[in-house]
Every structure is written in C-alpha cells, then in structure tokens.
C-alpha cells in the first residue's frame, strides 16, 4: 500500500472521528478501546475480540506517525 493511500485513509478516519490530528485520534481510539473492554463481557466472545484488536491496531497505526 502506498504512503499516499495510507495518508488518504488516515485523513478520512480523522474526518469521520471529528479530530484534527494524531494526538486527538489516539485519545479517541484509547477511549473507545477502554469502552469496548468494559462492554466486552456483554458481547459475544468473537465480536469482543475483533473490536479490541481493531481498536488496538488503530492506536498503533496512529502512533506510527501516519498523518494526512
């Protein structure tokens, strides 16, 4: 995947989250991750696992330095 493609997708994610930069997106993703962890006991096991892994991946991608 080209860097320009990644930047386009990250910019789209920022817009959908209503954040302007990586720091705000990381705060948003971590808050979502913690909320998912609290709700996980009520979710089906597979759904909870996918949600937690996805939120952690988003945090790692944003921490890696990709920005639009």
Image (spheres, rainbow, N blue to C red):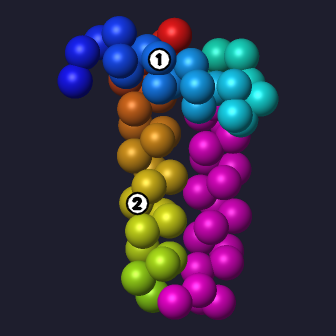
User: Residue at the left extreme?
Assistant: 1
Residue 23, label in figure: none
Question: Does 11 sit above or below residue 50?
Answer: above
Dividing the image into 4 quarters, which one contains the N terminus? top left
Q: Position of residue 40 (x, y in %)?
A: 58, 80
**Residue at 69% in and 40% down:** 28
Main SS of the magenta part reads: helix
Pick the front one: 39 or 17: 17
Question: In the structure shown, which secondary structural element does the residue marked by tag 1 occupy?
Answer: helix
Q: CA distance from mark 1 to mark 2?
A: 22 Å
Q: Residues within 10 Å of mark 2 (few under 14, many from 20)?
A: few
User: Residue at the right extreme?
Assistant: 18
Q: On the image, which quarter does residue 12 sit in?
A: top right
Q: Position of residue 33 (x, y in %)?
A: 59, 57
Residue 2 is at least partly visible in this image? yes
Question: Does 53 sit above or below residue 4?
Answer: below
Question: In the structure shown, which secondary structural element does the residue marked by tag 2 occupy?
Answer: helix
Residue 36 lies in the magenta-colored region: yes
Q: On the image, which quarter does residue 19 sit in?
A: top right
Q: Is residue 13 left or right of residue 38?
A: left
Residue wearing tag 2: 53
Q: Earlier in the sequence, mark 1 or mark 2?
A: 1
**Tag 1 and tag 2, C-beta contact below 8 Å:** no
Residue 43 lies in the magenta-colored region: yes
**Residue at 59% in and 31% down:** 13
**Residue at 62% in and 67% down:** 36
Q: Is residue 65 left or right of residue 34?
A: left
Residue 8, label in figure: 1
**Residue at 35% in and 10% down:** 4
Pick the front one: 27 or 44: 44
Q: Which residues are magenta?
A: 24-44
Q: Residues within 10 Å of mark 1 (few under 14, many from 20)?
A: some
């Amino acid at each position: 995947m080209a860097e320009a493609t990644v930047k386009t997708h990250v910019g789209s994610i920022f817009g959908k989250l209503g954040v302007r930069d990586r720091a705000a997106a990381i705060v948003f993703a971590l808050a979502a991750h913690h909320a998912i962890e609290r709700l996980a006991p009520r979710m089906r096991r597979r759904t909870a696992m996918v949600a937690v892994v996805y939120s952690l991946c988003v945090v790692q991608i944003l921490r890696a330095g990709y920005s639009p």
